[in-house]
Image (tube, rainbow, N blue to C red):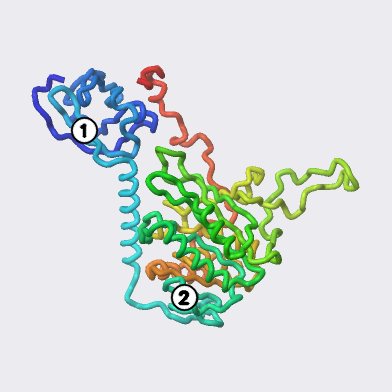
Amino acid sequence: MGIGRREQSGASWMIKSLGHMEAIRGFIQIPAKSRDELVIGRHRPFETLVNGAPARVDRHWRIWSSSLKDKFSPGSKVQVSLTQDGYKVELIVSEEQNKVSRVEKEDKRRLEAALSTITDTPFPADSMIGGRRFLYDRRFRHGCDIVLAWNDVLEFLKDVPKNTATLIVTSPPYNIGKAYEERVEFRDYLKWQEEVIRRCVDILKPEGSICWEVGNYIEEGEVFPLDVFFYDVLKRLGLKLRNRIIWYFGHGLHARTRFSGRYETVLWFTKSDNYVFNLDAVRVPQKYPGKRAYKGPNKGKPSSHPLGKNPSDVWEILVKDWDREIWEIPNVKCNHPEKTIHPSQFPIELVERLVLALTNEGDVVFDPFAGVGSSLVAALLHNRKGMGVDKEKLYTDIAYRRINDALKGTLKKRPLGEPIYRPKGNEKVAQIPPEWGSMPLSEWLG
């Protein structure tokens, strides 16, 4: 490069390519704030070296070298330095490390914000809100419409009598090292979960259901589908699987060495063959309501059910086409109106469907890992009783506020059945970048 100096420290930055493919093909975008320091008045494009290999800086302020192809992924952090002959590019933080760092920072920010709202004034242990008796304590007590407890789940369940709940619904900790989990060996984790489920079966009514919502456990890059392991646990306890419901969501972290995960599973088991199932409460609009029978005794008559279709076992949003058989409910991320500090929060809408279909008004819905109370809120919104426990008092304090807001009609939530936003195609972020057409494909491919 002929700049007459040895090595000089450059700037660190996130790889900000025009797209994922650019980083994979060996491009690194020089950010505006570092251009003067790293280019030093050179006229673009020009030839140079990167880590001793041939390279060039193009007119779009990008460093390119075949030696960089597939070396860094979008989301990684690199250090770029000037050398006597060109540039030195080194990895500082990998894509996965940086994802964890960003998540931890966001969790910390949300935690600090939540803590700042908490006062030393304790919540009332027993209160009447909107005509409902609300108990917030460590133990179960009869005669309440809502029981919220901060306690170990097995300790709490000691006081709950048999035949109490019609629906038990939860998303248990996945043992994947999130902020609210203490990671344990997988076999020990399953033994603990089996003991919790065993006690849940004890308090379940004969006509009741258990819905265990789980994702995947990841160990050294290998995927262990938790629903496979939990199926055996629940079957050993004498329960019967009625549906394996797929909950699809469109957004999440992007994987690099496997396909990105975009679904979780709800295992719906019943205690007996005589169980509550209110299909009419959760039917969805017919795609072709005007269809008519073309043969048989009803030939010429409407063939669709006037209340709508059965939503099937793969869920999409209520007003969309259910023939795809997807329950597409947004997960609680970023700007979701229900977002709190909890890192794996249940969307209320997902539980609402289960509450409507698997319970009747006045029934008890229990969540053994209640978190910030989404299951209890879903029960209250549809005139059921709610009961839940969580060991983290910070989360149950947030749950108390959300339940209080729900009873007063002021809770922020995503409406049941609201369509998911679909880009129209004219948004700026939906347009193809003009840079993509500024050079032959052969040059983009290197």
**Whether residue 409 is visible:** no
Q: Nearer the viewer, mark 2 or mark 1?
A: 2
Left or right? Give the position of 23 relative to 189: left
Rendered position, 373 above or below 12: below
In the image, 83 versus 190, the foreground residue is 190
Left or right? Give the position of 416 relative to 259: right
The residue labelled by disc 2 is 156
- Residue projecting furthest to the right: 297
Element assignment for label 2: helix
Q: Are marks 2 and 1 in contact (CB under 8 Å)?
A: no
- Residue 320 spot, x, y in % from top left: 63, 46
- Residue 102 spot, x, y in % from top left: 32, 49
| Quarter of the figure with residue 23 | top left
| Quarter of the figure with residue 175 | bottom left
Rendered position, 428 above or below 381: above
Q: Residue at x 49, y 68 (%)?
A: 195
The residue labelled by disc 1 is 80
Q: Residue at x 72, y 52 (%)?
A: 308
In the image, 108 versus 213, the foreground residue is 213
- Residue 135 spot, x, y in % from top left: 48, 78
The amino acid type found where label 1 is placed reads Val
Q: Residue at x 32, y 76 (%)?
A: 120
**Label located before the other in sequence (2 or 1):** 1
